[in-house]
Image: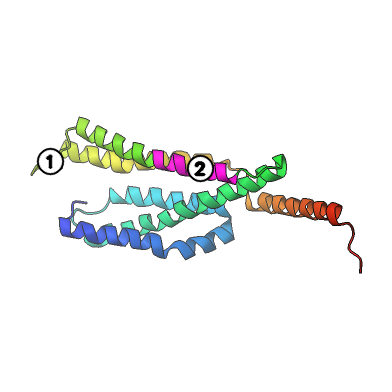
Amino acid sequence: MMLPRAHVSLVLIAHMSAALLSAPIWMRIGQTLGQHQAIMLAVFLYIASQLALLAVPPGSLLMVSLVSLVGGSTYAAFAMFPRAMMADIGDEELLQRGADPTWLLYSLLMGTWKVGQAASVGLAFALLAALQFRPRDMTTSPAAVTALYLIYVGGSVLLASLSLIALRRYPLTARRHAQIRAALRERADATRYDKEGPAHG
């Protein structure tokens, strides 16, 4: 992939711009497919974009930018859908237990998110140092560059694939959540009836 430093900034701009601009698209996809199906699609596209980096010709700014656009677009899905899915789980818990644990679920989500981000960076740098990758050196050995590819691409693909397997068994589908919302509305109506009595016309 090996780009001049000036081009790397352009790739990062494309990457983050795609994340911002694709949010409405992912919202529509989520409404059409359901949230967990939509995030599975996003994970698949992310894996494909990471693997595509291995096939990009060295120095090809256009190809790297296109791959970065695809990979960056998935970030919007990763930001939106886990939060929305947590809200659905909160509804299910409210129906089953009578208590709303949404605050706790969001705390767990954001806590694991931050721990994962910190741990991934620390682990990646530790592995690169162990494999003799030194970015400040004027020249880098082919083995060190290969190690960088394996960590950046291989590690991401492996973890994303595991999440894809886990998402296949996700039980709270759009249909199931609709049933939960209907049951919550019925319970709320029954509670209001018990408190206020029948309406008089």
Q: Earlier in the sequence, mark 2 or mark 1?
A: 2
* Image-based side of 128 in relation to 190, left or right: left
Per the rendered image, the range of residues in magenta is 102-115
Marking on residue 140: 1
**Residue 195 magenta:** no
Residue under the image location 58 percent in, 40 percent down: 169
Q: Which mark is residue 107?
A: 2
Q: Which residue is depicted at the point 30% across and 34% down?
A: 123
For this rendering, which residue is in front, 66 or 4? 4
Image quarter for residue 129? top left
State how many labels appear: 2
Q: Is the residue marked by circle 1 packed among few (<14), some (14-19), or many (20+) residues within 10 Å?
A: few
Q: Within 10 angstroms of label 2, few (less than 14), some, or many (20 or more) residues?
A: few
Q: Amino acid at mark 1?
A: Thr
Residue at 27% over, 50% down: 55
Q: Does residue 140 appear to the left or right of 124 in the view shown?
A: left
Q: Callout 1: helix, strand or loop? A: loop
| Membership of 110 in magenta stretch | yes
Instruction: State the image quarter where residue 101 is shown.
Output: top right
* Nearer-the-camera pick, 75 or 115: 115
